[in-house]
Image (cartoon, rainbow, N blue to C red):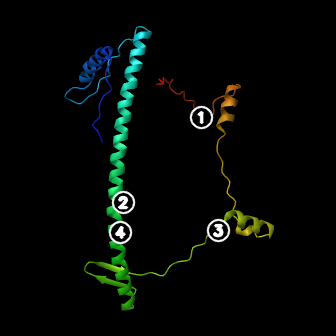
Amino acid sequence: MEALKHDPFDVRDEELDELFAEHETQKNDKSGDFYPIEVHDVRDELEAERHLESMQRVQRDIDKLAAHRDAMIKRAEDWYDERSSSLSNRTAWHLDGLRNYLSLTGKKTLKLIGGVIKTRAGSEKTVVDDEKFMEWATSNGYTNLITTKTTHAPKKSEIKKWVNEGGTIPPGVSFEKSDASFKVELT
């Protein structure tokens, strides 16, 4: 994959880049504490456009980094899958041999220096298709085979409506206001 190359900067971006770099270097001291980056005042629509254009170029760089990261993750996952598959096959081969040996001994457990080999009879598990079973049990009078669960939960919309209509705020109820949001959409 080719090295990440920045989109060519507009000459006007140099000023913004320098302003950001100046504040970026000031954001932490030797203690590692972070300080907020000083806001650059945008004074008119032309400057706002410059910031938006610069953000678009930065976003393209971020997208390129993400694509590179994803490609490397995919390579690593493919490598892992290939290697682990081979090792899993080897493990299965060992298990088959040990299972066969334990069967030949006639024992259920065999304690060795390297570990313990044991076998256990499988247990029976009840598997129910709920919809089919419920229909059968109710239509044939076997309700003793059915359990009924009741849940109780506050109706938040009704509580808010009741308080807004003049009711007092009940114990255990509070109202939290979310923060206002700010969003920039790049085109």
- Residues at discs 4 and 2 in contact (Cβ within 8 Å): no
Residue beneath the point at 53% across and 77% down: 123
- Mark 3 or 4, closer to the camera: 4
- Mark 2 or 1, closer to the camera: 2
- Mark 4: which secondary structure? helix
**Label 4 to label 2: alpha-carbon separation:** 10 Å
Instruction: Tell me if residue 68 comes above or below residue 96 in the rendering.
Output: above
| Label drawn at residue 81 | 2
| Label drawn at residue 173 | 1
Query: Which amino acid, mark 3?
Result: Val
- Residues at discs 1 and 4 in contact (Cβ within 8 Å): no
**Label 1 or label 4, whichever comes before in sequence order:** 4
- Mark 2 packing: few (<14 Cα in 10 Å), some, or many (20+)? few
- Residues at discs 3 and 4 in contact (Cβ within 8 Å): no
- Mark 2: which secondary structure? helix
| Label drawn at residue 146 | none
**Label 3 or label 2, whichever comes before in sequence order:** 2
| Label drawn at residue 128 | 3
Residue corresponding to mark 4: 88
